[in-house]
Image (spheres, coloured by chain):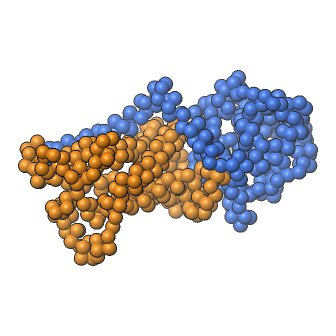
Amino acid sequence: MSSLITRRALVKTAALGTGALLAGCDRVAELPAARKILFSGEKLNMGLQRALSNRHSLAPEYRVDQMSPFFRTNGTSNPGTPEYAAMVADRFASWRLKVGGLVTRPLAISHAQLMAMPARTQITRHDCVEGWSAIGKWHGPMLGSVLKAAGVKDSVRYIVFTCGDLYSGANYYESIDLIDAFHPQTILAWGMNDQLLDVGHGAPVRLRLERQLGYKHAKYVMAIDAVASLTGIGLGKGGYWEDNVDYDWYAGI
Amino acid sequence: MTDATRSPDIPPPGTATPIYRHRLTTRIWHWVSAITIFIMIGSGLTILNAHPHLYWGQFGANADHAWLHTVRAPSWLTIPAGYNLAIARRWHLLFALVLGFGLLFYMVSSLLNRHFQRDFRIRARELTPAHLWYDAKEHAALRFHDPKQPNARNIFQKLAYVLTIFVLLPAMILSGLALSPGMDAAWPWLLDLMGGRASARSVHFIAMVGVVLFIIVHLALVILAGAWPETRSMITGWWRIPGHDKREDAA
């Protein structure tokens, strides 16, 4: 008799406990102190991953026969602004990639100049934060070569990408640190799957950042700025999704 | 910490039946994992909701062949209750560290204090059909302990724990690591082991289902074997053999 009560009580306690735990997690996540702990996982994971990997360790590259037959688009599939429509109409002839900020030689690189630079071709996997992945072939100069041409000053810590697509009226933006900026697979891709990059995938140029998730791979890149701090850019967290929905700035996981 | 060094199977002076069943390291790991696993499953289901399709191979997206389309996990099962992929990832990726390093801590301490060798070693005679059949009958009769060796784990217990600790949880952790593009660059063998990232995601899901089944069976057997004595033994370490102590039933 008594053991039955105990059993029933335990089942009830376990069920209530589970419900309370799940609901409690949401309450806890609202507390500033708990939120700080919760958000500390990003720095811990980044520190661990950086400690475990060589800063030049390469993302896996695939064979042609391993490529996705269809590479879906995501995020913005067309910026849809009059300015962007005009760029598409003249095949990006008047588009200039502005490289500025804390550099000794600010640059304005044309589409033709970018395509004339020594380029890297890599067949890599694109991992979306949502869970899907697709393998495509990307072609373009290393970001590091462009930054070297511009001359990054000693005080620079981050590279910021300002994009041609708008989110809530502001330009999409993303940022990376110098370890990733000078990684050999970090390229400014103007070609995809042996063709010019199309509008859906970020024409004229998108960033490829192969050791991080898709939302870091800025599309429709209009300007690249070398900065000492992310403060004062957007809401200061280093990217549109980071600012607005608490996505991790470090998206290596 | 003092009782962690005490040798099991030796009753404390003065009391006859209680036996020391769970060391401190085992108890700490058990309760930390109990909380962690619920957080991991709740937040993991939110992450699965973001793309409820599973594939085999190196890649997988909407146009590719999915072997499973999962049903949308209801909000009472997910962390957070309302769909928020960013917050779910914060929970999942922080507690993944607790799960991973917790298992490492438990494995090292259990090798050092000989918990694994003493309690989980499967002997050949236990795997004979006759013994398996005998133990199955004992389970059906709700007799889970050999009265002569009450502290010894039976063969089904051993198999369940060994499968969970040495197969399911490591598969869970390794497949989770293989989902990280940063880890794939650091440890490319993760992808070779899993057969690609899309496969790793499927393995991660299957391991989760396995862990959920383990939890259901585990909780059911705890209740059948004596809910309070079993739970108490995982809190204090001391276990009274159910049925041997009349005071137990009167409590």
**Can the viewer see residue B4?**
yes
Give the x, y percent position of residue A91: 87, 44
Residue A7 vs residue B207: left or right? left
**Can the viewer see residue A80?**
no
Residue nearest the observer in this picture, B53 or A159: A159
Residue B66 vs residue A201: left or right? left
Residue nearest the observer in this picture, B90 or A69: B90
Give the x, y percent position of residue B164: 39, 58
Q: Colour of chain B?
A: orange
At a point 23% along the width and 57% down the height, the residue shown is B151
At a point 80% along the width and 35% down the height, the residue shown is A224
Residue A61 vs residue A48: left or right? right
Residue A104 vs residue B6: left or right? right
**Image quadrant of residue A22?**
top left
Give the x, y percent position of residue B187: 62, 55
Residue nearest the observer in this picture, A15 or B102: B102
At a point 82% along the width and 53% down the height, the residue shown is A120
Give the x, y percent position of residue B2: 30, 42
Q: Which chain is blue?
A: A
